[in-house]
Image (cartoon, rainbow, N blue to C red):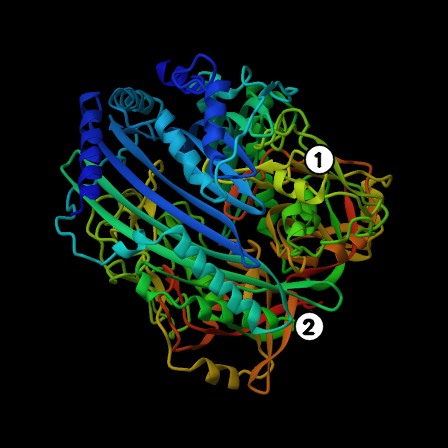
Amino acid sequence: MSDLVNELSEIASRVAALAKTKGADDAEAMVRDGSELTTKVRMGEAELVQEAGSRAVGLRVFCDKRSAITYSSDLRPAALEAWVANTVELAKLSEPDELNTLPDGGFATEFPDLELYDPSVEGMTAEEALKIAIAGEKAALGYDKRITNSQGATWSRVVGGMAFANTAGFVGGSKGSYVSFYVEPVCDEPDGKKRNGSWWTASRFLGDLASAEEVGVEAARRTVRQLGSEKIDTGDRVIIFEPEVARSLVSTIFGVSNGSAFYRKSTYLLERENTPIASDLVTIVDDPLIKRAPGSKSFDGDGLPTRKNIVVDGGVLKTVLCDTYTARKLGRESTHSAGRGVGGSPGPTSSNLFMEQGASTPEEILAASEGALYVTSMMGFGFNAITGDFSRGAAGFLVEDGKLGRPVSEITISSNFDTMLKGIDMLGNDLEFRSSISAPTVRIASMTVAGN
Amino acid sequence: MSSNTKTIERAPFAPGGANEIDRAIAKRLLGAALDAGGDYADLYFEYRSTQDFSLEDQKIKNVGQGVTMGLGVRVTKGDATGYAYCEELTIERMLSAARTAGQIASSGGSDHAFSLEEITPTTRYTVENSSLRQPPQEKLALLKRADVAARAASDKVIKVNASFVEQVRETLVVSSNGRMVRDRLPMMRFGVSVVVQDGEKRQSGSSGGGGRKGLEYFEALGATPEDHGKEAVRVATAMLDAREAPAGGMEVVLAAGDSGILLHEAVGHGLEADFNRKGTSNYSGQIGNMVASELCTVVDDGTVDESRGAINVDDEGNLGQSNVLIEKGKLVGYMHDELSAKHYGVDPSGNGRRQSFRCMPLPRMTNTSLLGGNHEPDEILASVKRGVYAVKFSGGQVNISNGDFVFSLTEGYLIEDGKITAPLKGVNLIGNGPEVLRKVVMLGSDFERSDGIWTCGKEGQSVPVGVGTPTIKISEITVGGTSAS
């Protein structure tokens, strides 16, 4: 373990133990330490260089089945002592909840190296980062003379450590790095309307990033191809979601299939466990143990060892992801999926959640989908988790002659999410693990497009 | 009790505090920030104390508390910004943050002479009155009252969640322009959400409010915990029988109040001057042009007493103001921060806001309103042959560059022959900002401000805002339903 993780682990253990001496039956403490560097260029000039570090500690105490959760960034010993005592006092305001205790055991004891940290990330200077950003934006601006402006190119890194400890003896920690690079060019329509598009690369390891030029060129290609976008007529169409947008479908599935949504009865999937909730092409996996992946971790927010969970298997809802409290509410076992921030309650989270890829190339999907709408972006919050009603703004392309044809914007696509998942009839073979939620190209048999 | 008195301590950087920042220290920090040759620097000290309570399954489930504090230092050189922050207010850490931010300039040292003037802004809210000063038991009782009222409102209620979040934020801004301004901003937000069930059908509903107010908020008509509990049940119950919404372009009537979210998305963001300075907004270069129907006058006003969007002073030390953006359809001004005001050669408009000391300020809205017209709301509804009446929303989003915006309806009704006939399933409405504002054909005389619930996100930073509108009729906007007829 690194010095940083040892130091944070020591603080977390000390804070949890301190809570016990102040009268708590049990306690958990989490410490995070992070530093960031963000550099942004616009039209070839530096626009922002931001550099800073921060540290905070969060504490949850249990007293007579009552609990309180607090956080502080003041780690001086006297301040810590007063803060911990105050937290124990605060717990008296809540009401007893039999389920509100530490997990019954089974804490992680082994911490596999998931390759979450690349030391060379921390070595990057602002000057080097600005050079990359300038190169990426330049590639975008030079790609097509119709690119006239830019929202800029942003290179940023986060490096940090965390540790978590409880009074049952668990202590664990990790150190991680994450770099991302984003380019957003702008072009003009003859009528003055502007079109923006973007592309990005991200990884825990510097060497795994796409080059600045590749990102810039792809951002530019995605921008100019939207020129001339128009509404299309209202009616039902086959809908294809590109991977970048299909991710949000996977995220929505998590939102309605996790234990918290279940015990709060705020999902249309209630009582649908072990039944088909999607077409048999659909398998969704949550895997926290993938090396170098953005959402990987060896223990969860309750201190339990993480594991791979199959959420949806061949269309059937197999696993409702739960943390310890949520699982108890539902009368079952945790799936070791607790997530928590420094100052928040634990709750079920996904780690690396993805829809498994299918057999078709994206080109084959287009070739089989004449007249379909290929969606490249969605807008708005039009989803009702309890009824499954889905309605969001969209933009993309009509599929013409088996390829992307006329650009389309200012339309909505609507259906019921249950119908949508069951209507998935083609999956691309183009899954990538660029972000912690990912999907291949997804085709849905029919949705209503509202336009003219 | 002790846990409560703890939360209302003054910031350590306040006069008499452990890390008091006086003019001498501020000058020293600004000097360090500008040492490498920056044009301008500001210091933003922030101390934020929050407390939250939540109720679930008829029990007070969570009690939380937190304090964050820090200093953000910004240095500009031309259009470039250097930014750094620290969380410990020791002189060494603060000087180090100032020098880090200052590295954006490399032209070398210059002598800066500052004459800092302490400004005392007009007060639109008071911390003396803040809920954080009241005993926690009073707030727990509010949650219980909402829970009881919601359960009593209908036997269909199967779940009630309620929450109360409160905060006091103390700030000190010092700029190399000579401003030194302190402020203390209270905020509280109350919310109830319910799930109702009728046979196989389930539906959710919510209600909430607040602002830079104290607990007297709950004494107003429509704002008691019981009112919010019942309102959440009313919405959920009304939407239990919602039918498929129509798809395509049609007349839409927006109810007074929260419909201001349309305004916020359709024009508000597009008039934030950073986008215009960079030429990336579709309102760039449009000052003096007609961008909306003649009925439309749009104002952004940070001076509305105790409102969620109120600011005595913005996060760059400029006083909160009321600014006319669109007058009778004509674009007359943008919302500015220091950078954009300098670019346009105008005075800052008091719109430079930030989420916290970890973020640089950006031009942001405060309370954005479309002023009222002279039609009776009933008259407006009666004028619609077939359309949608939009009442409640879950949020909105805009693409600044092309002007496309959406807002998501959670309570809406079908209008047929001038009458409300059936509840509709939640849908998105999509339009293009300038086009939709030109299609505003009637405005009600019933101008209303939203209750304090809205939060605006931009470039990863969230700030509290308010909106307000009268009843609005739009001659055509695309409704994203699933029913072709």
Is residue B60 visible in this depiction of the protein? no
Which residue has dot 1 on it? B347
Q: What is the chain identity of the residue bearing mark 2?
A: A
Residue drawn at (66%, 60%), measured in percent from left and top? B402
Tag 2, which secondary structure? loop
> In this figure, what is the number of numbered marks?
2
Give the quarter of the image for residue B9. Answer: top left
Give the quarter of the image for residue B55. Answer: top left
* Image quadrant occupied by the C terminus of chain B: bottom right
Which residue has dot 2 on it? A228
Between B106 and B28, the one lying in front of the other is: B106
Residue drawn at (54%, 82%), measured in percent from left and top? A369
Count residues near mark 1 (Cα–Cα under 10 Å), then give few for <14, some for 14-19, many for 20+. few
Query: Can you give x and y, in whole percent of width and height, for residue A217 in the image?
Result: 50, 71
Query: Can you give x and y, in whole percent of width and height, for residue B457 in the image?
Result: 55, 45
Select label 2 or label 1 by which is in front: 1
Residue type, label 1: Asp
Tag 1, which secondary structure? loop
Between A134 and B328, the one lying in front of the other is: A134
Query: Can you give x and y, in whole percent of width and height, for residue A26 in the image?
Result: 20, 30
Q: Is residue A103 left or right of residue B43?
A: left
